[in-house]
C-alpha cells in the first residue's frame, strides 16, 4: 500500500503556489520627515552632591515616583524656579 500513496504538496510548496497566484497591491508607506538636529548648544550635566534632611529626601523620592520622573529632573526644575525668583 505504501507504493500506491500519492505524495501531496508540502506546506512550503503550497504556500509558494498560493503566494505566487495572488496579485500584489502596492502599499503606500508614510516616511516622516527627519528630525532636525538641535543647533543650540546644550549644557553638559555635572554631578552635584548635597545633604538633605531624611524626611525631605523621602518626600522627593515619593514625589518623583508618583509623577514618573527622575529625581534629577525634579531638583533641576525646583532650582530653576527658585533661582528665577531671586
Image (cartoon, rainbow, N blue to C red):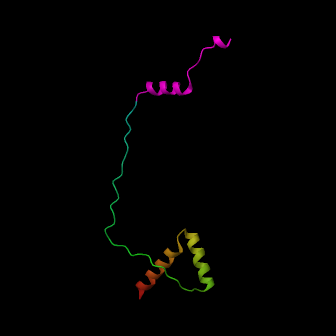
Q: Is residue 16 above or below residue 26?
A: above
Query: Whole-percent x and y of residue 8?
Result: 58, 19
Q: As drawn, which residue projects farthest toward the front?
A: 3
Number of on-image labels: 0
Query: Whole-percent x and y of residue 29?
Result: 38, 43
Look at the image and give the residue range highlighted in magenta.
1-23
Q: Is residue 51 above or below residue 23?
A: below
Quarter of the figure with the C terminus? bottom left
8 left or right, relative to 78 = right
Q: Nearer the viewer, residue 64 or 7?
A: 7
Q: As drawn, which residue projects farthest toward the bottom?
A: 86
The answer to which quarter of the image holds residue 43 is bottom left
Q: Nearer the viewer, residue 72 or 44?
A: 44
> What secondary structure predominates along the stretch shown in magenta?
helix
Question: Residue, x 52% and y 83% (percent of image)?
Answer: 49
Query: Whole-percent x and y of residue 68?
Result: 55, 68
Question: Residue, x 56% and y 73% (percent of image)?
Answer: 64
Question: Residue, x 41% and y 75% (percent of image)?
Answer: 44
Residue 11 painted magenta: yes
Residue 26 painted magenta: no
Amino acid at each position: 500500500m505504501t507504493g500506491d500513496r500519492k505524495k501531496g504538496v508540502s506546506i512550503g510548496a503550497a504556500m509558494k503556489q498560493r503566494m505566487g497566484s495572488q496579485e500584489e497591491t502596492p502599499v503606500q508607506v508614510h516616511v516622516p520627515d527627519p528630525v532636525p538636529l538641535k543647533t543650540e548648544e546644550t549644557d553638559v550635566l555635572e554631578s552635584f552632591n548635597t545633604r538633605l534632611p531624611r524626611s525631605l529626601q523621602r518626600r522627593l523620592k515619593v514625589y518623583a515616583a508618583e509623577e514618573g520622573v527622575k529625581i534629577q529632573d525634579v531638583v533641576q526644575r525646583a532650582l530653576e524656579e527658585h533661582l528665577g525668583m531671586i
